[in-house]
């Protein structure tokens, strides 16, 4: 077939295709046209019926114009009517006003006559009711009315009478109230308390009444404090007696507020609790300060704070200093008392906040006034002695708790002991027990800032002091020893198992090293658990946290993750130490034995080699003894890391010795087999995948096991069978060149 | 949303009333708050800024200046990447306290923390601390120096952005690998060893 024939046929094909397309198009056009045609009769029908509508529409238009005119007329007349109604309304309201003025005048008369009589009768309720009626009248309007009526002097006289009566009654009631207070006449106290608002002196009433309540609170509080101070040490509440006293004060105040709030609301109206609480708060402040001062004195807080700050200035480990170190245990109870005191203060503050806010909410409706009121209240509360002292308590608590944590952890480290049945030592459990305890205690203070500060402290102590201890233990190194290796590990292992650790410095250092490494690993788990547990506990303790507070907390907790990364670094450092002092010195000679074997086998030599103990069998046996000596000593994760380091070392060394050897086809075959069995041995030894670490070695073995140089094409390139190579082309060439039966020229000519 | 490349913690310290809270509010919310109460404990705010097309999340900790909050605020120094020490240019005592603040920073903060001295309230007419006095103090103590006004929004943005820029630079320098994968493992061991032993 020639080229032109080809193209003719192609053209023909093309033309046929075009024709087909045109035919399809024609068909569809035809179809569309017939649909349109079909619709034509319907459309005609519609046009006809629309034409019939035109006359009807004309009639409607005419009617609509008429309607518009009518509506305009109606609107005009209603405009006129509504003007009249407006006038009527005005007139009516004038009449009402007039009526109310008349009423006022009549009442004014009645009140002015009644009030004097009531005062003379000592019927203060009645008198106050008259005054109340008088005060509810618009005073300026009253003045105007007086000008309007004929009987000017009469009206003015009544006003004056009532004004006089008001101030007379005010003074009287205040006097009577104070008298009742002096006589402890509870009935009269309540009686006159209710009269103040009728006389329009709400604030005076609240001040008088709350001052009275203040006095009562003060008496009880003083008695309680006296009892507290004289409590004997033998008393079982001695250690928390100040927390108890504080609790009594708060409970007393809360009761006073709870009892009197309904009274206040009924006779004074809502929105006035703020004034009452303000006065009571003054007493609260006085009493809290007293309790606090006595507590400081009794518990020698200043002395303790001074000692603590001096100790921290000198440094934690100066056991030589003459300073009297406080045993953290002795602070335990005191810290408990402070958290309790702080928590109680926090609760009381929340209580009055809740009460007052709710009262403002229903009592003050104007939103601007409401905001002002809320601000004034918050300001007053924030500046109150109670709040200041709460902050001071928290501050003392934090100093003591921080000291407690540091010292206790120092102690745990100093008293560290290894139990031969454990992979870790006591300091890990002890340290995390302490950290947990301190954080829990901070949670019980109920203050997020306090909790965050303790979490920050925990991060600092763990990251600095504690990690430093682990680090310095690993820095001592792992003595590789002079014994024959298998023997050495057996000795070490059996001595650990039997708890005989004193038999040699070397063994002790080895144990210390391994334990430190395991401690670091177990700390990682502890930190994770701590993070999770603490977050839940805090969320339970402070259910109302907003997103900002959450962010604050999470940011502090994330400090613990930097502890984890520190620990991981420490472990990595330890494993590298083991690699250079344990793995390398053993593994290198084992692998180097590869050089003593010729890898140019004849068939006969091969069967002899395979009948005896092969290189890889010896290697695996040696590795087995090394690994088994570490398997029980190390934690699972550490053992995996150890196997990982061992694998890296073996594969890299093997690669090196392979490069120094030369192979024939059978030699390559054997190598491939041996690499496979080595890989499967190590894979079985660990829970990690070591495939990646074997990738290069496996590929080297594949290269050396080729039948011919050209076979590399099966593995190299962009086709499905190709490998993801870890060897560079030049590395691949140099391995191919180790095969004595491959021609160097063939290798060089390979296109890679 | 949370796709930032860097996260830095910035802590503001200094006497109560020098304007730390106002600086933070100006920067994070763009406003000068009217008569808010003194800060209690620590406040926490976040602002993400863009520097060199990189998103940088700044976690800003605004501390209370009073003594009784010290045990709370001190616990934040250690993890800070930058510390801003603020005084009020119209109030000599706030400047006189700076050495005390520096002692605290020395004691609790990381020695490599970026430290910035800020003289705030330059909008005020009654200046007591001339600029060069602040500058000299900062120089003597190895700190950056800047004068600001939270009220007039002067230098506030610059302050925080400059801190972000510097911290990025620091972080990048630290990230430059000391060894690469082709060097042998022995080198790697010593490099880790050195880090731990230093
Ligand atoms: N004139 C002026 N006043 C400021 C400035 N910054 C803050 N203030 C005022 O200083 C007072 C204390 O500010 P604040 O931010 O609460 O100080 P902090 O205690 O350091 O947080 C407030 O009354 C602010 O209005 C400023 O740049 N200029
Ligand atoms: Mg502030």
Image (spheres, rainbow, N blue to C red):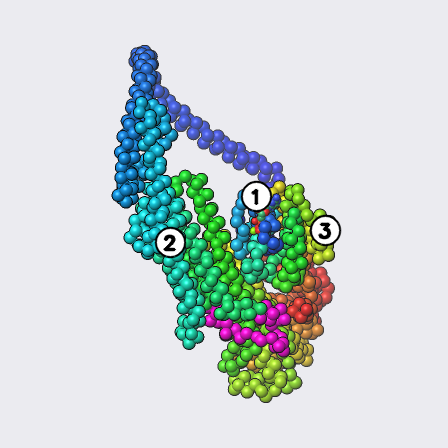
Does A170 appear above or below A35?
below
Looking at the rendered structure, the secondary structure element under dot 1 is: loop
Which chain hosts label 2? A
Marks 2 & 3, CB-CB < 8 Å contact: no
Q: Which residue is mark 3?
A: B133
| Chain under numbered label 1 | B
Element at badge 2? helix
The N terminus of chain A sits in image quarter? top right
- In the rendered image, residue A328 lying in the magenta stretch gets the answer yes
Choose between A521 and A671: the one closer to the eye. A521
**Secondary element type, mark 3:** helix
Q: Which residue is mark 2?
A: A212
Q: Position of residue A259 (x, y in %)?
A: 33, 54
Looking at the image, residue A62 lies above or below residue B48: above
- Which residue in the structure is indicated by mark 1? B32
Q: Residues within 10 Å of mark 2 (few under 14, many from 20)?
A: some
Q: What segment is highlighted magenta in the picture?
A: A307-336
Q: Residue at x 71, y 48 (%)?
A: B130
| Rendered residue at 59%/50% (across/down) | B17
Mark 1, residues whose alpha carbon is within 10 Å: few (<14), some, or many (≥20)? some
Asked if labels 2 and 3 share a chain, the reply is no
């Amino acid at each position: 077939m020639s080229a032109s024939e080809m193209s003719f046929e192609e053209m023909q094909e093309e033309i046929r295709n075009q024709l087909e397309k045109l035919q399809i198009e024609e068909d569809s056009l035809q179809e569309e046209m017939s649909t349109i045609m079909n619709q034509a009769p319907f459309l005609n029908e519609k046009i006809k019926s629309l034409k019939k509508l035109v006359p009807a529409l004309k009639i409607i238009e005419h009617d609509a114009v008429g309607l518009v005119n009518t509506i305009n007329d109606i609107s005009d007349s209603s405009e006129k009517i509504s003007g009249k109604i407006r006038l009527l309304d005005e007139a009516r309201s004038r009449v009402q006003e007039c009526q109310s003025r008349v009423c006022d005048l009549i009442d004014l008369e009645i009140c002015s006559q009644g009030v004097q009589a009531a005062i003379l009768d000592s019927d203060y309720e009645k008198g106050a009711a008259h005054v109340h009626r008088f005060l509810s009248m618009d005073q300026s309007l009253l003045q105007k009315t007086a000008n309007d009526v004929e009987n000017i002097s009469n009206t003015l006289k009544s006003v004056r009478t009532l004004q006089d009566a008001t101030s007379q009654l005010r003074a009287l009631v205040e006097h009577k109230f104070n008298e009742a207070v002096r006589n402890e006449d509870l009935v009269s106290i309540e009686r006159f308390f209710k009269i103040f608002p009728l006389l329009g002196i709400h604030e005076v009433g609240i001040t008088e009444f709350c001052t009275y309540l203040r006095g009562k609170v003060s008496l009880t509080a003083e008695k309680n404090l006296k009892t507290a101070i004289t409590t004997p040490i033998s008393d079982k509440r001695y250690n928390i007696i100040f927390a108890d006293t504080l609790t009594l004060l708060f409970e007393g105040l809360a009761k006073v507020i709870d009892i009197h709030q309904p009274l206040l609301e009924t006779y004074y109206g809502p929105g006035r609790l703020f004034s009452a609480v303000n006065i009571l708060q003054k007493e609260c402040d006085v009493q809290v300060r007293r309790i606090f001062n006595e507590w400081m004195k009794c518990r020698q807080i200043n002395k303790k704070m001074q000692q603590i700050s001096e100790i921290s200035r000198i440094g934690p480990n100066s056991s030589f200093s003459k300073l009297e170190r406080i045993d953290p245990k002795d602070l335990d109870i005191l810290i408990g008392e402070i958290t309790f005191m702080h928590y109680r203060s926090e609760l009381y503050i929340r209580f009055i906040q809740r009460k007052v806010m709710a009262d403002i909410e229903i009592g003050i409706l104007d939103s601007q006034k409401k905001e002002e009121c809320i601000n004034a209240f918050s300001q007053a509360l924030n500046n109150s002695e109670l709040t200041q002292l709460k902050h001071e308590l928290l501050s003392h608590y934090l100093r003591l708790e921080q000291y407690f944590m540091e010292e206790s952890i120092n102690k745990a480290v100093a008293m560290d002991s290894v139990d031969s049945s454990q992979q870790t030592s006591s300091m890990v459990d002890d340290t995390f027990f302490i950290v947990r305890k301190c954080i829990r205690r901070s949670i019980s203070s109920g203050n997020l800032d306090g909790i965050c500060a303790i979490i920050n402290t925990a991060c600092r102590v763990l990251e600095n002091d504690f990690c430093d201890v682990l680090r310095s233990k690993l820095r001592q190194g792992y003595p590789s020893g002079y014994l024959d290796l298998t023997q050495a590990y057996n000795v070490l292992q059996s001595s650990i198992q039997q708890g005989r650790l004193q038999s040699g410095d070397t063994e002790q250092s080895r144990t210390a090293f391994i334990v430190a490494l395991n401690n670091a690993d177990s700390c990682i788990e502890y930190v994770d658990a701590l993070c999770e547990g603490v977050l839940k506990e805090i969320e339970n303790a402070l259910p109302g946290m907003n997103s900002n507070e959450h962010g604050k907390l999470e940011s502090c907790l994330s400090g613990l993750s930097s502890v984890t990364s520190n620990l991981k670094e420490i472990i990595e450092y330890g494993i590298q130490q083991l690699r250079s002092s344990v793995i390398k010195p053993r593994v290198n000679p084992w692998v180097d034995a590869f050089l003593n074997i010729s890898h140019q086998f004849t068939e006969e030599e091969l069967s002899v080699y395979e009948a005896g103990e092969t290189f890889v069998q010896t290697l695996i046996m040696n590795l087995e003894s090394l690994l088994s000596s570490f398997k029980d000593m190390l934690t699972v994760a550490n053992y995996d890391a150890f196997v990982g380091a061992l694998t890296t070392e073996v594969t890299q060394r093997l690669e090196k010795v392979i490069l120094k050897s030369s192979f024939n086809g059978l030699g390559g075959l054997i190598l491939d087999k041996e690499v496979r069995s080595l890989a499967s041995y190590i894979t079985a030894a660990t829970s990690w995948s070591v495939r990646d670490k074997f990738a290069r070695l496996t590929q080297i073995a594949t290269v050396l096991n080729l039948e011919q140089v050209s076979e590399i094409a099966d593995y190299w390139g962009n086709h499905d069978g190709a490998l993801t190579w870890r060897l560079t082309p030049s590395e691949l060439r140099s391995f191919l060149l180790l095969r004595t039966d491959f021609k160097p020229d063939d290798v060089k000519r390979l296109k890679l | 949303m949370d796709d930032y490349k860097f996260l830095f913690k910035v802590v503001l310290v200094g006497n109560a009333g020098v304007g730390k809270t106002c600086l933070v509010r100006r920067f994070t919310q763009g406003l000068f708050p009217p008569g808010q109460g003194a800060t209690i404990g620590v406040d926490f705010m976040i602002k993400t800024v863009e520097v060199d097309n990189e998103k940088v999340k700044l976690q800003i900790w605004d501390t209370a200046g009073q003594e009784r909050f010290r045990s709370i605020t001190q616990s934040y120094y250690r993890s800070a990447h930058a510390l801003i020490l603020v005084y009020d240019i119209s109030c000599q005592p706030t400047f006189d306290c700076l050495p005390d603040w520096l002692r605290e920073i020395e004691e609790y903060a990381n020695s490599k923390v970026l430290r910035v001295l800020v003289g705030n309230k330059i909008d005020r007419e009654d200046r007591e601390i001339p600029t060069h006095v602040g500058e000299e103090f900062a120089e003597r103590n190895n700190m950056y120096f800047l004068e600001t006004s939270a009220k007039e929004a002067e230098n506030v943005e610059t302050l925080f952005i400059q801190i972000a820029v510097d911290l990025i630079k620091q972080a990048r320098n630290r990230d430059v690998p000391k060894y690469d994968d082709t060097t042998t493992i022995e080198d790697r061991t010593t490099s880790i060893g050195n880090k731990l032993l230093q």
